[in-house]
Image (cartoon, rainbow, N blue to C red):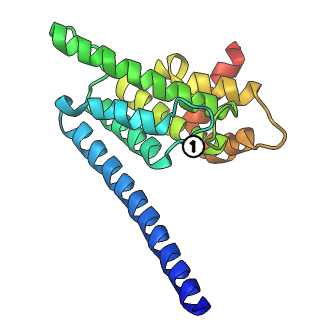
């Protein structure tokens, strides 16, 4: 009898772990669908807000969903490439409202990642730096050279230089992964440092 009880307990444990894996898989699928739809059509841009809620939970104790963070990074990169963040003089009032809304969501996402870089969220600073540099690249490529000093890159550089934690290697990660590998990052970093 004791043997059958332990078998049942083991069976229940297996069922529970299967459900947890299934739920995680379902959330990953949901995130993928939200991402796909958000990049397909402006009528699905509200998916960005849903992904932001998953990526940047309002409660400090909640863990951010890394799949949602990656999805948002890809969405914003595609929106930059598609010209959605360019100022077009011929936008209708409705299109201007949509663009303003997207810019606000982008600012929320960037702010969340910048806080992570300052060690104020549950994301590792090196991961936040990777996402931020990808967004900076998109800004610069799609909006122009002035984004080195007017965009995310300038904010990232300021944080990397000011907020040094001996236990974290944000500066080392920046130097090894970006400064030494990319001449444009090196040149613009040095130009910014000359004026700071």
- For image coordinates 47% across by 38% down, the residue present is 55
Quickly name the residue at label 1. 63
Using the rendered image of the protein, determine whether residue 4 is visible from the camera's viewpoint. Answer: yes
| Residue 88 picture quarter | top left
Residue occupying the far front of the picture: 1
Q: Relative to 37, is 182 on the left or the right?
A: right
Report the front residue among 165 and 188.
Answer: 165
Above/below status of 170 relative to 101: below
State the image coordinates of residue 98 (x, y, percent, origin top left): 25, 18
- For image coordinates 71% across by 40% down, the residue present is 170
Q: Relative to 152, is 173 on the left or the right?
A: right
State the image coordinates of residue 165 (x, y, percent, origin top left): 81, 36
Report the front residue among 139 and 49.
Answer: 49
State the image coordinates of residue 117 (x, y, percent, origin top left): 65, 33
Please identify the quadrant where the C terminus is shown.
top right
| Residue 97 picture quarter | top left
Please identify the quadrant where the N terminus is shown.
bottom right
Using the rendered image of the protein, determine whether residue 91 is visible from the camera's viewpoint. Answer: no
Residue density around tag 1, few if under 14, some if 14–19, many if 20 or more, within 10 Å: some
- For image coordinates 70% across by 31% down, the residue present is 160
Above/below status of 42 relative to 95: below
State the image coordinates of residue 25 (x, y, percent, origin top left): 38, 60
């Amino acid at each position: 009898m004791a043997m059958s009880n332990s078998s049942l307990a083991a069976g229940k444990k297996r069922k529970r772990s299967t459900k947890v894996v299934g739920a995680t898989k379902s959330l990953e699928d949901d995130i993928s669908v939200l991402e796909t739809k958000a990049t397909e059509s402006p009528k699905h841009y509200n998916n960005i807000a849903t992904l932001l809620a998953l990526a940047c939970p309002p409660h400090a104790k909640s863990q951010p969903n890394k799949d949602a963070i990656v999805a948002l990074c890809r969405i914003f990169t595609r929106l930059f490439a598609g010209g959605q963040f360019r100022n077009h003089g011929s936008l209708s009032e409705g299109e201007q409202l949509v663009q303003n809304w997207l810019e606000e969501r982008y600012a929320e996402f960037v702010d969340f990642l910048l806080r992570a870089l300052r060690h104020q969220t549950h994301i590792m600073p090196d991961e936040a730096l990777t996402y931020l540099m990808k967004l900076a690249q998109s800004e610069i490529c799609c909006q122009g050279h002035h984004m080195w000093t007017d965009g995310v890159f300038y904010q990232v550089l300021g944080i990397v230089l000011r907020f040094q934690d001996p236990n974290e290697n944000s500066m080392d990660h920046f130097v090894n992964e970006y400064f030494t590998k990319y001449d444009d990052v090196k040149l613009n970093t040095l130009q910014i440092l000359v004026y700071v």
